[in-house]
Amino acid sequence: MPEVDVTAVEKEWRNLHKEDLFFEWSIKAFANDLKPQLRCVCCGRGGHLIETCPDLELPPIIPIQPLSNKQKEFLELVILDTYERLRMTPEYGCMMRDLCENLEKCLCDKYRSDCRLALFGSAGNGFGLIGSDADICLRFESETFTEDIDACEVITTVAEVVSTMPGIISVTPVPSAKVPIVKIQCNNRYHRLEADLSLYNVLALENTRLLRAYSELDERATVLGVLVKEWAKCCEIGDASRGSLSSYSFIVMLIHFLQRTTPPIEGRTCPKEARIVDGCDVYFCTAKDSEWHTKNVENVTELWLGFLDYFSRRFDFTAEVVQIRRKEPLSKLDKRWQGKPIAIEDPFDLKHNLSCGVHLQTMAYIKRSFIQSRERFARIRVPTRQLSNRRFEAFLIELLHDCRVGDGPPLARNCCYRCKQIGHFVENCPVGQKGHKRYNQSRQCFCSAAMLANRKYLRSGKGTNVEENRERQLRKGSLADDELPSKADSQMSTNRGNGGRGRCRPGHMEHFSEPDRKDDLCPLSPFPVMVSFVLYCDIVLAICFRIF
């Protein structure tokens, strides 16, 4: 430590004046006229804030002229033809039920006799498309999921049993997903049918019943539902796994609009009877209980244009929640969803936002899709002559393709920073959460005790001596005597320690996972220099106080 010249310090202090220690409260004095750079939290670019972000700009909503009678008739023909081409046929639905029955029989014979399988989603809600996947729910004797059921073990065992069935191409277990599933691909008699088998997804069964009841109330709802799903698919905004909205969300938006038409398409209210499933009240009025009636006589053309117009300029996405539970508006403030670009309430799980994985940029793209589709369908041209079946199909493809905005939605910011997957953000990521039951189960599924026992080096062995690793493992009983590393292995480990990934900067400890192992500080470590500087400052201050 350098010696302090007390006389020189005292002389310097006596020569100081008040003017030397006076500073103005200005940007020049504190930041030398340097201003903070503006950076948008939405797109990450500099020079602007989120209020003026170009990625969130919407095109102006222009007024549209009412359609002529010929345009209405032709558009109605287009919508009905689209429905007939894309709706799920009875044969396709029978094929799904046949697959579900065969899977249940196989699991009961080779796994557990109390296995019960049920279809949900597009297979049973009345809004299914041809070629849709079969969503299957697996339950046991108990109606609710109990803690003694190991989801990872069940999914793995089910995958092994299903793979032995004839006509099965591939079986892929996904036990680490938010909802553990088994992906199944079938061939031969099932004609390349794909299925997702989940465990105790009982709330989805109730959602299927609800949508099925809506589809049976009015045929116009079914026609529009099939069109909405195909339109969202063509605009690339109907896939929740890629950061946009699910098809189920669009059906909820459609029902929300139909409930608010003039006059609305609704039924009479009926007494409410609580029915609890998975902690949620899933009771709703059926068509028989509600004495269904409607005074709305609009055709599918007027309802479709009204749907696009409603979400293009009438619905306030910034303040309201899309919901079908009540007639009165529901604000985001009431649900505490103010920070979400769009809020769609699940009809039963009221705490679940169906659009929680949508980013601001994707939401702006969805709004632009509504606006552009509104204008495209409003200026539809009627052909001068009757189109052939082939040309009519090409016209449908072109019409829906024109609704797509640009090159598609921006999906770069829609991924999780932790697992790099699209469809959720880091706060809802199923990977890496401490104490997360499903994550721990998935680790136990793929990291067995045998795998850990066969590991030749410890995780903390990066950059350490191989002989020390071998001795530690022998003491712990995790390494057999015949598994001795060679000299070549020792040299490779030494090279990794000197210049590989596990090398630490000077002055830092290299072995974080071994608290009993300590490394000496490097001579170039900044810690002694920092201590010397602090002591020097203390001495100078003490001298100053003594002088003044």
Image (cartoon, grey):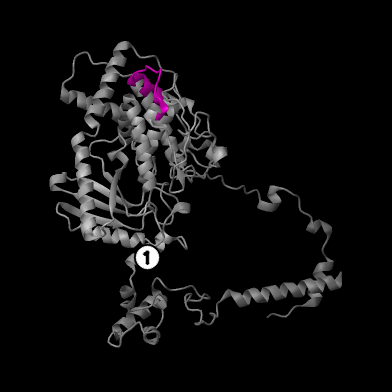
Q: Circle 1 sits in a helix, a strand or a loop, which is it?
A: helix
Q: Which contiguous range is marked in magenta?
A: 289-307
317 relative to 191, above or below: above
Which sits in the foreground, 445 or 91? 91
Q: How many marks?
A: 1
Residue at the disc numbered 1 = 443
Can residue 99 be seen?
yes
Examine the image and state in which quarter residue 231 appears: top left
* Residue 10 falls within the magenta-colored stretch: no
Seen from the viewer's position, the closer of residues 74 and 537 is 74
Please state if 54 lies on the left or on the right of 84 as rendered.
Answer: right
Q: Residue at x 16, y 23 (%)?
A: 389
Instruction: Tell me where residue 379 appears, x and y as whole percent.
Output: 34, 18
**Magenta segment: does it hold 302?**
yes
Q: Is residue 235 above or below residue 459?
A: above
Amino acid marked by disc 1: Arg
Q: Name the residue located 35 percent from the left edge and 32 percent from the top edge.
A: 213
Q: Nearer the viewer, residue 38 or 432?
A: 432
Residue 423 image offset from top left, x and y in percent: 39, 47
Local crowd at mark 1 within 10 Å, few (<14), some, or many (≥20)?
A: some
Q: Quadrant of residue 375?
A: top left
The answer to whether one can see residue 405 in this image is: no
Drawn side of residue 70 relative to residue 535, left or right:
left
Left or right of 36? Residue 128 is left
Question: Residue 343 in the image: x percent, y percent?
Answer: 48, 38
- Residue 163, compared with residue 98, is above or below; it is below
Give how far across and how far down residue 12 sits, in percent: 80, 69
> Extreme left residue here?
188
Locate the N terminus by quadrant: bottom right
| Quadrant (top left/top right/bottom left/bottom right) for the C terminus | bottom right
Residue at the farthest right position: 548
Front-most of 266 and 287? 287
